[in-house]
Amino acid sequence: MTASRDLSRSAPATWTTTIYTQWQSRVLWFLLIVKIIVAGANAFTFDIRDQYDAGMHFSRTATCGIYTSERYYNPPGYYLLACPAVVGALASEVDLLAEARAVFAGDTSFDQIIDKYKHNIKAEYLSVNFARPIYHTLNVIMLFGLYWFCAFYIFPKFLPSAMSAVTASVILFALPGFQKLAAMTHPDNLFVFLTILMFALWCRFAARGELKLREAVILGLLAGAAALTRPFSIVPVGAMGAVLALETWIAIRGSNKDLRRRFVIRLLAFALVAGSLGGAWWGYRYVATGTVVAMFASEHEVASTFESREKDFDYGAFYSTFHIADLLETPNRTFGDGGTDWRVSNNNSFFTLFYSDFWGDHWLYFSGPRLVEAKAGVKRALLAYALLVTPLLLYCAFRGLWVTGRQVLAGQEWTHQLFVILVAVGSVVVYMVWTATHGVEPGKNSAIKFIYLAYAIPFLLMLVGAGLPIGRTAGRVGLALSLVLFAVAFPVSLYW
């Protein structure tokens, strides 16, 4: 390995590429536009009361994400986007100038003001309804950015052929989880976008030559902003820091003193900016709650309900079962006779739940108003077809991991390849550890969601694309399977 940043193949210096044929480009643009139109229609017809933890996200919105507790653990980055709506809503209910004068006079504090108004139902309602068009507009724009960066910039230059890039892009477009996410008031929208934007800019900077100090600061700002969205940001932010640190260590071992100094300064600049920005929330949270990482107080009703079951929980069955027949019969969570209440010990099969929500909508947040199943037939079709697609994707992902890993060890454009591996593998490891610890809720297990891995999907698809068999026939078969996947998954992407 060397500290070189010559990535002429995997990172063009411009935002355009000519790797696609005309028909390939037209197909991708058509599918992208279709899914963005669907996402926009979904976003503005979606009943926001149907999304999970709706009340929690509404409450965070009403205080621009600043109010925190042991339950309110997400950083405020996404909620800050709605500040204009919140200020407008509160201004109609509260004398903001009088409150500001009281703060400056020492008669009250900012925390007291938040505590005073965080449960103001009318202000909360106004803020959510004023914020909704802001959130949804930005969600759709960020989804477009994700699709465009992947399909027309990153995939074409990271993957070995135009056909593999097209196939990976079609699979990305097909996944209904991104349509669900774009309709929700949820910080993973911003997290996913910032993660891919950070990687795309890093690739472009590298194509210009050695990373400049100004560019390191920009990457630090993006990494810090990503860290202000979700705790899972530790994976991409940590991966970028690790790669830059490894590159700096390699430079330090060299004989060029000026090169060593430049790399060290850039690493320190990145770490200082990203650490200061991203760490600010966790410092504030510690001061406000006395904890940094705890998400639920053990005495909380929901937490205590499931904690009492964990000692007798069958982890073996949880991670070794796959009830596909039951899933095809009822492709969602069930209630009442023949099913379960969400607090009863059922739904205890990790791979059944993950498969169901990855390809469908297991938790019924996106199946029509008020958690009523309206798409059982199209879900069954997609879940059945995915039985063919899933093993092929897994095979290609592991093969791509092997191929990309060998490139890293050989020192071939290794920085960005190593980042892709760290994010793809790290995201899965962190997610699995979390679901086996804090995420375990016997009888509910609603932490098993596509959304929690959405930020890693582009990087996992890069491994899939890198592992696709080379050859015209294999490429055409892979593309055909992905186009059928898009068609079968399309009805599941519709909210109505």
Image (cartoon, rainbow, N blue to C red):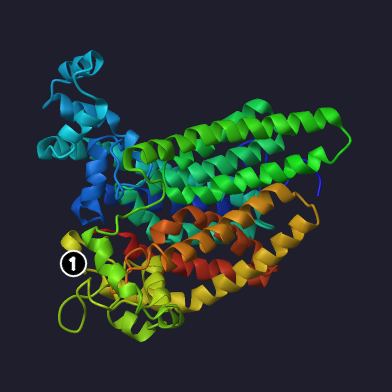
Foreground residue among 454 and 390: 454
Could you say where residue 5 lies in the image, as x and y percent from the top left?
75, 40
Could you say where residue 445 lies in the image, as x and y percent from the top left?
33, 69
- Res 467 seen here: yes
- Residue indicated by mark 1: 372
Vertical placement of residue 155 versus 326, above or below: above
Mark 1: amino acid: Val
Vertical placement of residue 28 versus 201, above or below: below
Question: Crowdedness of circle 1 by 10 Å Cα count: few (<14), some, many (20+)?
Answer: few
Look at 60% across and 52% down and name the residue there: 155
The picture quadrant where one finds residue 346 is bottom left
Q: Quadrant of the C terminus?
A: bottom left
- Res 166 seen here: no
Secondary structure of the residue carrying tag 1 is: loop
Foreground residue among 385 and 132: 132
Look at 55% across and 45% down and name the residue there: 237
Foreground residue among 400 and 427: 427
Look at 51% across and 67% down and name the residue there: 482
The picture quadrant where one finds residue 200 is top right
